[in-house]
Amino acid sequence: MYFSKNIKYLRESANLSQEKLGELFSLADTTISNWEKGRSTPNIAVLIALCKHFNTDPTTLLYTDISVLGVAGARVELMGGAKEVQDEVTPVPLYGTVSAGASGLAAFWEREQPVGWVAAKEFEGCLAAFRVVGESMEPEIKSGDMVFIRSFDKGSYYSPQSIYMIVTREERMIKRVRIAPDAADVLICSSPNYQEFRLPITEVLAVYKVAGFVRVV
């Protein structure tokens, strides 16, 4: 859990003292201090209020290291190697999560509001970034990584070296993809740690190409 680290990072980024942050939510500065030391966490009502104030969501505030979104301390993983995150670049919106073996995640990210922004020069121009949940793409992409996507025509050629984000009515997920040899309208989706499966193209709302990902180091 990253709550104690995140609340301190957000408070300091907003140039707020513990006392001032406490005043905003009618709390004692000792409460803020205990949060930042990991001694306690807020109740659900205060957690939601904090998310609204800092323009984030509970999952991100609790479980994502917000300090790596656009600052040093992360590595940009391209399909050909790793580079340091660059400052002073146009950030990419971060939208919630994408499944790598974890089911039940929302599909329609276009209807969501960004939960944060990721600044990485190599990914300028990408449509969006997502936090990975699940272990199906390990060791290449791990749970907690942030993947960046670009536009892709679902009827185009699928490279065996590439990873794609597939959006259906039920979920969005990252997989390696190829056209079924016996049916041009069926995708075969695979990952290192799960059995591959067939997915009719008619059930696919959209496909995006994963340009790379950010990993905390």
Image (cartoon, grey):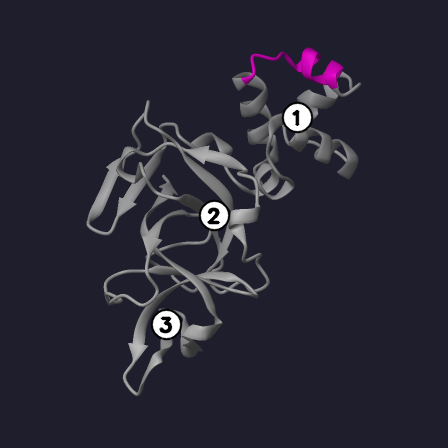
One can see residue 198 in this view:
yes
Secondary structure under tag 1 reads: helix
Secondary structure under tag 2 reads: strand
Question: Which residue is more in the foreground, 64 or 35?
Answer: 64
Classify residue 67 as left or right of residue 214.
right
Relative to 175, say whether 179 is above or below. Answer: below
Q: Position of residue 129 (x, y in %)?
A: 42, 44
* Residue at image point 19% right, 50% down: 80
Residue behind mark 1: 53
Residue 190: numbered disc: 3
Q: Main secondary structure of the magenta part?
A: helix
Relative to 8, say whether 101 is above or below. Answer: below
Mark 3 packing: few (<14 Cα in 10 Å), some, or many (20+)? some
Q: What amino acid type is highlighted by mark number 2?
A: Arg
* Residue at image point 69% right, 31% down: 39
| Spatial separation of the CA atoms under disc 3 and disc 2 | 19 Å
Q: What amino acid type is highlighted by mark number 1?
A: His
Q: What amino acid type is highlighted by mark number 3?
A: Ser
Range of the magenta residues?
14-24
